Amino acid sequence: MHRRRTTLLTVIAASLVACGGAATLDGETAADVERGEELFQANCALCHGPQGQGTNNGPPLVHEVYEPGHHSDASFHRAVEQGVAAHHWDFGDMPPIGGLDTAQVDDIVAWVRERQREAGID
């Protein structure tokens, strides 16, 4: 039931965007998600992969471990601002990522959450 409800909500949100509505499921706009992808590619993809699937240098963010109920959006902000000690994976510690403001990290998180929803992780 939950999967069907999520799929229906995703279809409704996509339809709203396609018909001129701007909001996605979590309130971010298509423009936020698009900016988030650009920022992700420039700042995160080297370690987390171009689609958030992970690499030999960093874990996949499109993974159940990072679903919103376990890693909130705030945890992504803390990771960028303060870095993260390795705890779920054996990739070593993540250093802080400089040069990103709160709005930019919000956009990156919006893109990651969109990828997660597409993968059925929500």
Image: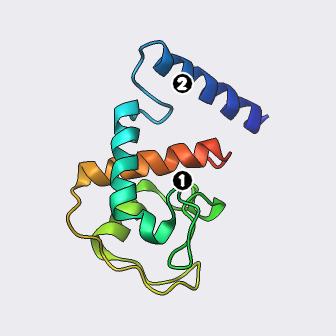
Identify whether 26 is placed above or below 44.
Answer: above
Q: Residues within 10 Å of mark 1 (few under 14, many from 20)?
A: some
Residue 89, above or below 77 = below
Q: Left or right? Give the position of 27 relative to 121.
A: left
Please state, as top left, top right, bottom left or bottom right, where the N terminus lies in the image: top right
Quarter of the figure with residue 22: top left
Residue 103 at x, y = what percent? Answer: 25, 48
Residue name at image x 58 percent, y 85 percent: 90
Residue drawn at x 58%, y 57% is 62
Displayed quadrant of residue 28: top left
Residue 120 appears in view: yes
Image disc number at residue 111: none
According to the picture, the residue beneath numbered tag 2 turns out to be: 13
Q: How is the image coloured?
A: rainbow
The answer to whether residue 46 is above or below residue 42 is below
Residue 102 picture quarter: bottom left
Amino acid type, mark 1 = Pro
The residue lying toward the viewer, choosing from 112 and 66, is 112
Q: Which amino acid lies under the numbered mark 2 shown in the image of this protein?
A: Ala
x 30%, y 75%: residue:
96
Q: CA distance from mark 2 to mark 1?
A: 18 Å
Q: Secondary structure at mark 2?
A: helix
Determine which of the numbered discs, if any, sits on residue 68 in the image.
1
Q: State left or right for residue 46 relative to residue 66.
A: left
> Residue 23 location in percent, x, y?
42, 26
Q: Residues within 10 Å of mark 2 (few under 14, many from 20)?
A: some
Residue 107 on image: x %, y %: 35, 46
Question: What residue lies at 68% left-to-right and 25% top-to-bottom?
Answer: 8
- Front: mark 2 or 1: 2
Find numbered disc 1 in the image and state the secondary structure of the residue it sits on: loop
